[in-house]
Image: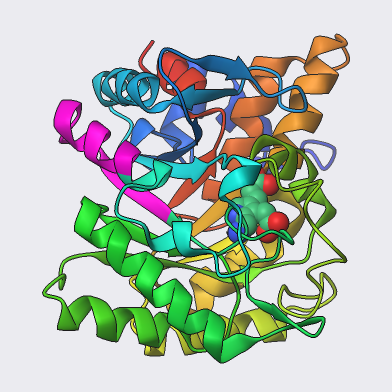
């Protein structure tokens, strides 16, 4: 046999990139519509679709328009919608009672979606911030965000959401012990099929800025959330939180924000093998949109690449404001 001349590379990785067909054959990760959870903002009124200035392309919708959007999402094959209420300041109180009212915005939206788009899984957010006069996820007593009293309120809130027909409860509050308390309460009330997607590794992040505008909580928030949300410097702690929440009965776990925390996603998936989701949060969305609007990046390609990165990092799905747009692209 004639020896191969030394200068020729033996392994040519570019062979596997030579055409669309070959690239498709060797592709390791796919992004599909099944991976998408669409977060939406609900507000009072009727026939209203109001733009969120800090999130171009995102709307606050009244309940009737949410139902309409859900029907469209169902037609696109989007599996789940996640509801966030924009609460009128007049409904924010110290005891946050609106949070577990059967007829609050979120619960009305859940029922409206179920009526027109029964195949969509409805996910609801558990945290007191939309209803709290001080914008915190928990009760504030003498300047301290108190844990156990908050967990009681969160449990009531989750039960009201399950009663309204929510399929997935998403505690995003970061209090200790809330997953176990909610799981027990759901079981006790006969909601054994209602799932819990725990925001297990939720960081105290500056990337939530535009969201707080969207739900009208920016003006209300006093201080920061550093005593309950995680320090961005920590990774082992995220693994311990995920272990704890899975033990307490979480069915799925979340890492939030997304792109700056892909290492956490990968570690979580490798360590626990549980259904793992990332939240591509408002600030991540706004950055991509703003750069695209300025012509600095290709909006569509950047969006798709960012979502693929979550899949590559081991996530089973992504909460993303891009969901309907991506679904349309993926459906061809
Ligand atoms: C609050 C909550 C936040 C988000 C979801 N639920 C903000 C916060 O913790 O202050 C952020 C979502 C986003 O930025 O897109 N419970």
Residue displayed at 31% across by 40% down: 108
Viewer-nearest residue: 29 or 159: 159
**In the image, what residue occupies the spot 66% across and 86% down?**
146
Q: Which residue is painted at 26% across and 21% down in the image?
A: 71
x then y, percent, for residue 300: 64, 16
Q: Is residue 225 left or right of residue 92?
A: right
Q: Is residue 51 visible?
A: yes
Question: What colour scheme has been applied to the protein in the rendered image?
Answer: rainbow
Quadrant in which the C terminus appears:
top left
Q: Position of residue 144 (x, y in %)?
A: 77, 84
The front one of 265 and 294 is 294
Q: Residue at x 81, y 74 (%)?
A: 226
> Where does residue 86 sit, x and y in percent of width and height?
57, 39
Nearest the eye: 255 or 123: 123
Taking the view exactly as shown, the residue that stands out farthest to the left is 190
- Residue 4 seen: no
Q: Quadrant of residue 74?
A: top left
The quarter of the displayed image where residue 19 is located: top right
The answer to whether 257 appears left or right of 227 in the picture is: left
Query: Residue 63, relative to residue 234: is it above or below?
Result: above
Residue 244, how many percent across, how many down?
49, 89
- Confirm whether the magenta stretch covers residue 126: no
């Amino acid at each position: 046999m004639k020896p191969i001349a030394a200068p020729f590379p033996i392994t040519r990785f570019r062979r596997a990139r030579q055409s669309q067909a070959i690239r498709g054959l060797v592709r390791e990760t796919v992004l599909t519509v099944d991976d998408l959870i669409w977060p939406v903002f609900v507000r009072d009124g009727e026939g209203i679709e109001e733009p969120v200035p800090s999130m171009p392309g995102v709307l606050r919708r009244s309940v009737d328009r949410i139902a309409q959007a859900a029907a469209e999402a169902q037609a696109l094959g989007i599996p789940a919608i996640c509801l966030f209420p924009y609460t009128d300041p007049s409904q924010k109180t110290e005891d946050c009672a609106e949070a577990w009212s059967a007829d609050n915005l979120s619960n009305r939206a859940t029922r409206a979606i179920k009526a027109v788009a029964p195949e969509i899984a409805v996910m609801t957010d558990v945290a007191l911030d939309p209803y709290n006069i001080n914008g915190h996820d928990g009760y504030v007593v003498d300047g301290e965000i108190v844990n156990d009293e908050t967990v009681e309120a969160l449990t009531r809130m989750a039960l009201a959401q399950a009663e309204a027909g929510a399929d997935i409860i998403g505690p995003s509050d970061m209090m200790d012990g809330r997953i176990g308390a909610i799981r027990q309460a759901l079981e006790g009330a006969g909601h054994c099929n209602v799932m819990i997607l725990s925001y297990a590794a939720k960081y105290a992040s500056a990337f939530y800025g535009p969201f707080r505008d969207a739900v009208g909580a920016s003006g209300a928030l006093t201080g920061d959330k550093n005593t309950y949300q995680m320090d961005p410097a920590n990774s082992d702690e995220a693994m311990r939180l995920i272990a704890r929440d899975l033990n307490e009965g979480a069915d799925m776990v979340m890492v939030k924000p997304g792109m700056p925390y892909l290492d956490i996603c990968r570690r979580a998936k490798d360590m626990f093998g549980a259904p793992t989701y990332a939240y591509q949060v408002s600030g991540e969305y706004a950055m991509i949109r703003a750069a695209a609007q300025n012509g600095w990046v290709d909006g569509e390609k950047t969006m798709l690449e960012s979502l693929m990165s979550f899949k590559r990092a081991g996530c089973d799905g992504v909460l993303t404001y891009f969901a309907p747009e991506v679904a349309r692209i993926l459906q061809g």
